[in-house]
Amino acid sequence: MRRGFTWILIVTLLLALVLLGGTASAEKYTFAWIPKALNNPVFELGREGAFQKAKELTEQTPDEVEVLYVGSVASDAAEQARVVEDVVARGVDGIAISCNDPTALIDVINKAVDAGIPVMCFDADSPDSKRFTYLGVSNYDGGKAAADLLIRYMGTEGKVALLTGVPGALNLEERIRGFKDGIKDYPGIEIVTTVACYDDINQGVQVVEETMQAYPDLDGWFFVGIWPLFAGRGSMPLWEEAAKSGRCKTVAFDTLPEELEYLKDGFLVGLVGQKYWGWGYDSIQILYDYIVNEQEFPDWIDSGMDIVTIHNVDAMIEAWNTQDFTKPLPPPFPEE
């Protein structure tokens, strides 16, 4: 009788340990994914990537993973800082953020980390903060690639204008720095002006058209971001006429569907693209591995970049149509 009771007790204890262990290993993790602005369509694919990775992790691990998609409506560093403070107060487990300003976000990122919430950056970094890694393209190299594209199509002489978003945003400043270094060996190329649209589509249209009026003999543009192209055909008649006729060559950052159609129709000559899906998809995996698996990451994770010209634009359009970005693109210049 005593022996039977002992075995029952042992089995009960073992079962309890198993149940307790199972309960302890199954956790819920909420990660805040914060873009620069909710009104910037460039982040929409990354958002979907984040949701997809959370779904996969929930299905493939013992844990439940949730993505909190939050941000300021427009690009505003002070408002973005308040968004970070809000998710910290809500007790999220990790934060992935694209910073509007590398300096303005330092304090709030550091406060989050000091509160025990790991922070990583994607797309736009805050390197002097306590974030544990940055996932993104080398914006400096992207700017140099844009310069190479423009030189190929425009030549080594001409007047060029630059369009940027929020002055001071580290990713945009690095693209401009790379572009300027890319043309520095060509004294015949003159940057006549750099205009800012503060990530606003309508303001982008306005400053581009104003620049075309001020410099009717402009030979080239570098759109550091896509902003005015979201306004649609007919919104920038001066630029469109000069671009379509071939008088003014335009290279732009990003490879979103709107830009691909502009390129295919002859308004743009080249694009430098980022891994938008990975901004979300990879960020959530990185946060999960850092927190749950205690995996270490380098200071910068190079996501790589895509160069798109008329020679491979159809392949990139297909990638968007199928939502499959795993296939390598054909070369932008087949002769190479």
Image (tube, grey):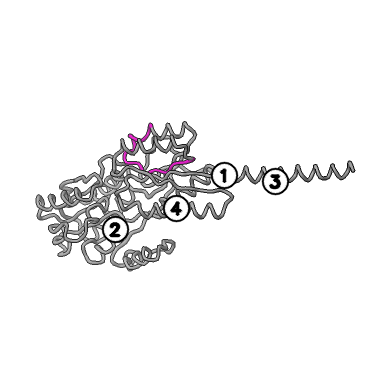
Tell me which numbered mark, 2 or 4, is placed earlier along the sequence: 4
Return the mark for residue 51: 4
Q: CA distance from mark 3 to mark 2?
A: 55 Å
- Among the two numbered marks 4 and 3 on one chain, the one whose residue lies closer to the N terminus: 3
Label 4's element? helix
Quadrant of the drawing holding the N terminus: top right
Residue 18: assigned label? 3
Taking 9 as reference, is 284 left or right? left
Q: Is residue 47 above or below residue 86?
A: below
Q: Which residues are magenta?
A: 93-107
* C-alpha distance separating marks 2 and 4: 27 Å
Of mark 3 and mark 2, the one earlier in the sequence is: 3
Which residue corresponds to the image point at 47% horizontal and 40% vertical from the top-left? 92
N-terminal label among 1 and 4: 1
Name the residue furthest right. Answer: 1
Badge 3 amino acid: Val
Q: Indicate which label's residue lies in the foreground, 3 or 2.
A: 3
Asked if residue 131 lies in the magenta stretch, the reply is: no
Report the amino acid beneath label 2. Answer: Leu
Single out the mark in the foreground, 1 or 2: 1
Amino acid type at image mark 1? Glu
Q: Main secondary structure of the magenta part?
A: loop
- Estimate the spatial distance between the alpha carbons at disc 3 and disc 1, rounded to whole Å: 16 Å
- Mark 1: secondary structure: loop
Judge depth for marks 2 and 4 and give the one in front: 4
